Image: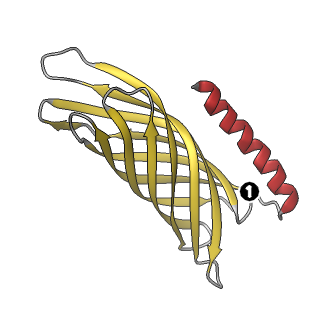
Amino acid sequence: MKYKLSALVLFTALGVCSTAKAQDFKYVPYIGLDYSYVDVNAKAASPYYNAGSFNLGTKYNDYFGTELFYQQSARYDKHDLKTSYRAYGLDVNAYLPLGCYHTFDAFVTAGAGEYVFRFDPSGAKSHNESAIGYRWGGGLIYNVSENVSIKATVRYVNLDDISDYDHLMEYSLGLRYYFL
């Protein structure tokens, strides 16, 4: 599983190098914060989470960028099921500038991350389960100014090796600050 994440990082680096030759290269780092509503498809129950994430990213030009993320959820506590999760990983983003003044960007995203779920069942010992989650989605960015944007994302995450959890849908709204 860790080899898959390493391969994604390598392909991202190769994409950056090829994009830099073809486009006007400009390196714009940014930080971001997101709020996410996460709906999990599970066999026994359908938990949902409120989560926050911190993002470090880079736009290499107007059409391509990468983003590291760390996400932590609040605890889900219903019907004797108490769970939470944390995740970290890398996403690759492709942007399409919209409008005469570049006010909006449509984007698609793909990536991978490690998801660690903590289960605290009633009357039993708590335990953690982890898996690689393969993520893809899209959304819209509203550029408030040169330095600030608002980002709305819908993302599907396919989980492997988590008992009773198949996939999750993530709906997020966030804020980005670009260091120009």
Q: What residue sits right under mark 1 in the picture?
A: 60
The foreground one among 82 and 160 is 160
Q: Position of residue 93 (x, y in %)?
A: 62, 55
Give the quadrant of residue 163: top left
Q: Which residue is at 51% across, 68% downward?
A: 140
Q: Which residue is at 45% across, 31% downward?
A: 160
Is 133 displayed left or right of 43 in the figure? right
The image quadrant where one finds the C terminus is bottom right
Q: Residue furthest right?
A: 21
Q: Position of residue 99 (x, y in %)?
A: 61, 82
Q: Residue furthest front?
A: 43
Q: Which residue is at 40% across, 34% downward?
A: 86
Is 56 displayed left or right of 133 in the figure? right
Task: Give the colour scheme shown.
Answer: secondary structure
Q: Position of residue 135 (x, y in %)?
A: 51, 45
Count of numbered labels shown in the rendering? 1
Q: Residues within 10 Å of mark 1 (few under 14, many from 20)?
A: many
Q: Which residue is at 53% across, 74% downward?
A: 144
Report the amino acid beneath label 1: Tyr
Give the quadrant of residue 25: bottom right
The image quadrant where one finds the N terminus is top right
Q: Residue furthest bottom?
A: 100
Give the quadrant of residue 75: top left
**In the rendered image, the vertical position of residue 9 relative to residue 172, given as above or below:** above
Is 51 displayed left or right of 62 in the figure? left
| Numbered disc 1: secondary structure | loop
